Image (cartoon, helix red, strand yellow):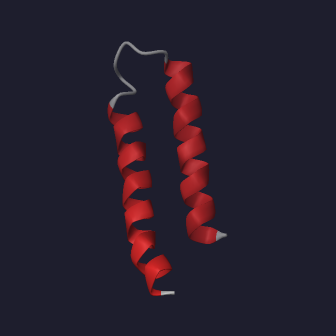
Amino acid sequence: MRLRLSSLPNIMHRDWARLRLSLSTQHRADPVRQHCAQWSADARAIWHALYH
């Protein structure tokens, strides 16, 4: 129990870091469609982790 509770913030922090990274790199010369797909996948993963 303690291990899961302590690992949860780390997982959340990693997901939010990936989300912020994808947002910050979205305006670069990379394919916009790829970033939108990645952002949507990250957002859904975070949503399910938080609310399901």
Q: How many marks?
A: 0
Quadrant placement of the C terminus: bottom right
Q: Is residue 21 left or right of residue 48?
A: left
Nearer to the camera, 40 or 14: 14
Relative image position of residue 28 (x, y in whole percent): 34, 18
Q: Say if 27 sits above or below 12 in the image.
A: above
Q: Say if 27 sits above or below 15 in the image.
A: above
Residue 36 lies in quadrant: top right
Q: Which residue lies at the image location 56% right of the left edge and 68% below the top edge?
A: 50
Q: Which residue lies at the image location 51% right of the left edge and 87% below the top edge?
A: 1
The residue sitting at the right extreme is 52
Q: Say if 5 sits above or below 28 in the image.
A: below
Q: Is residue 51 left or right of residue 20?
A: right
Nearer to the camera, 3 or 9: 3
Q: Is residue 37 left or right of residue 2?
A: right
Q: Which residue lies at the image location 63% right of the left edge and 61% below the top edge?
A: 48
Residue 49 lies in quadrant: bottom right
The residue sitting at the bottom extreme is 1
Relative image position of residue 41 (x, y in whole percent): 60, 42
Relative image position of residue 6 (x, y in whole percent): 40, 77
Relative image position of residue 10 (x, y in whole percent): 38, 64
Q: Which residue lies at the image location 49% right of the left edge and 77% below the top edge?
A: 4
